[in-house]
Structure formats: C-alpha cells, structure tokens
C-alpha cells in the first residue's frame, strides 16, 4: 500500500511540474528572447562590439576580469556583515555607463548574480542583454583573455 502512495506522489509531482509556468526568461515565453548564452557565444559577441558588464564586487573585479574593448564593473550586490545585499544603486550606476539600447553581456563569477542582474535589466527596459552562463570561472577555463588591475605596490610588497 505504501508503494502506491509513492507512485501517486511522483505522478502528482510530474503533473504539477509540467503544468506550472516557467519562471525563467526563455524563448518559449512570448516576447522574451533567451537571455542566457554560453561563454563561447559571449566571447563572440564581445568580439563583435558588445559591452561586458561585470557585476562582481570591485575586489573580485580587480583580481581579474574579462579582457575586452568595453568593460564596466557595477556590483549587483555587496557582502556585508549581515550577508549579501543587493546594490540599491545598481540600475542608476548601470545607466551612468550604458543606455537601454546598448548591447551588453553580463557576467559574474559563476553566472548566478549575472542572471539576477540580467533579469532586472531586461525588466527595466534594456533591450539587448545576455547573461554569460558559467561566468568568469568558465571564461578562465576556456583560456579566454583576462586582465588584472594593477595597483601601486606598497613599500612592504617590494
């Protein structure tokens, strides 16, 4: 008798999962293009003139980032003693370096923050925005060009 309950449970889960609407921005949703691309496609778009928007923290960005002609760093969230907090000025800062019609590839460390940022940008009227799946980790794994911001050395680092 317990086995039949298990079968019913899984059948119910299957039926519910098939009929629930998707929460991702995929091409199956009317009026929405697929916003997530793989790192190879991201590299091609950047080579064709897209701007790279790195949404990692400033500290992460300075340790190394995608090397492309147009790169901006606008953190999507900050690490605080209370945990991660969304940057309340994210959209304002993005709009100070980009406009709603710019072609953007958005990236972070692994693709999670950038997916949230990309969804926010699309819902705020940006027309040509793509999320780079796998983020900087995938970019480095593919041995694509990276840049490290050089800071002045302190006397004790010489």
Image (cartoon, rainbow, N blue to C red):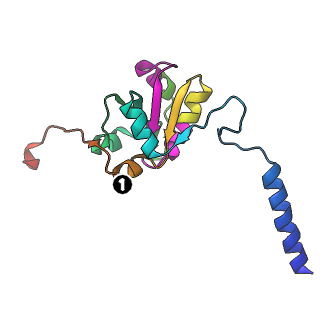
The picture places residue 101, in percent across and down from the top left corner, at: 51, 19
The picture places residue 129, in percent across and down from the top left corner, at: 52, 30
Magenta segment range? Answer: 93-117
Q: Is residue 109 magenta?
A: yes
Residue 39 versus residue 103 in the image, above or below: below
Q: Residue placed at 82% from the left, 67% from the top?
A: 10
Of all residues, the one furthest to the right in this rendering is 1
Q: Is residue 72 magenta?
A: no
Residue 147 versus residue 91 in the image, above or below: below
Q: How crowded is mark 1: few (under 14 residues within 10 Å), some or many (20 or more)?
A: few
The residue that label 1 is drawn on is: 141
- Using residue 64 as the reference point, say whether residue 5 is left or right of it: right
- Say which quarter of the image contains residue 43: top left
Residue 102 versus residue 73 in the image, above or below: above
Query: Can you see residue 90?
Result: yes
- Say which quarter of the image contains residue 5: bottom right
Query: Can you see residue 53?
Result: no
């Amino acid at each position: 008798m317990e086995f039949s309950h298990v079968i019913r449970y899984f059948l119910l889960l299957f039926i519910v999962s098939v009929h629930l609407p998707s929460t991702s921005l995929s091409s199956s949703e009317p009026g929405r293009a697929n916003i997530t691309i793989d790192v190879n496609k991201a590299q091609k778009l950047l080579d064709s003139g897209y701007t790279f928007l790195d949404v990692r923290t400033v500290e992460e960005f300075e340790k190394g980032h995608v090397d492309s002609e147009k790169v901006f760093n606008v953190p999507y969230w900050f690490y605080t003693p209370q945990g991660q907090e969304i940057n309340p000025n994210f959209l304002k800062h993005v709009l100070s370096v980009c406009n709603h019609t710019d072609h953007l590839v958005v990236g972070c460390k692994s693709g999670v923050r950038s997916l949230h940022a990309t969804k926010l940008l699309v819902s705020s009227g940006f027309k040509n925005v793509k999320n780079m799946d796998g983020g900087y980790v995938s970019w480095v794994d593919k041995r694509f060009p990276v840049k490290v911001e050089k800071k002045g050395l302190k006397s004790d680092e010489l």
